[in-house]
Amino acid sequence: HTNDAPAAIARLRDLGVPPFVIASAIVGVIGQRLIRRVCEGCAKPETPEPHLIDRFGLDPNDRFVLGDGCPRCAGTGFRGRLGVYEVAEMTTQLGEAIDRDATTRELTRVALAGGMRPMWQDGIDKARLGQTSLCEIVRIGATMSEVGRSAAKADDQTPAGRAAA
């Protein structure tokens, strides 16, 4: 049970799995979270607030939706769930970081540098498709591990650095 994919590596260490076994046995780690799906019966256009545009690095012309509430969704504006994901692929650099017993913050930084797209980015893509709302992505961001946010802030070149600010 972890908040993101890189933290699963640290969790395995906490369980007593030696670093060389982790680095050699894992091909990748998938982090996932379920989010609420916007009700198709009452979805309406949503204009993101300026602070969300800045936080997530959005294009002000992007289109988003929000459920207004209807009998079909019992007035919640949401009906059903969908997953958002991140995949930390085992790269040479990530394996080396595991072998040297790197912190979760460092593992996250290495995974991001190796091409991992954080869950919140998958969520933004799904919000742009009208499948979920930005408030759901904010909810995910609010529950991201502090380690993940700190690692993202440390790497100012990544979009995650902008989102965590």
Image (cartoon, helix red, strand yellow):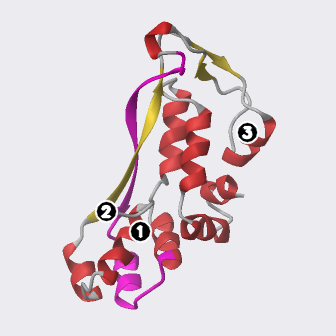
Where is residue 92, by image quadrant? Answer: bottom left
Q: What crowding class fits label 1: few (fewer than 14 Cα within 10 Å), some (14-19), or many (20 or more)?
A: many
Q: Position of residue 158 (x, y in %)?
A: 61, 59
- The image shows residue 144 at horizontal and vertical percentages of 54, 58
N-term-proximal mark, 3 vs 1: 1
The residue under the point 32% across, 69% down is: 90
Residue numbers of the magenta segment: 75-104
The answer to whether marks 3 and 2 mark residues whose Cβ atoms lie closer than 8 Å is no
**Callout 1: helix, strand or loop?**
helix
Q: Which residue is mark 3?
A: 53
Callout 2, which amino acid?
A: Val
Q: Is residue 130 above or below residue 142?
A: above
Vertical placement of 100 versus 111: above or below? below
Q: What residue did someone put label 2 on?
A: 29
Q: Which mark is residue 6?
A: 1
In this picture, residue 119 sits left or right of residue 58? left
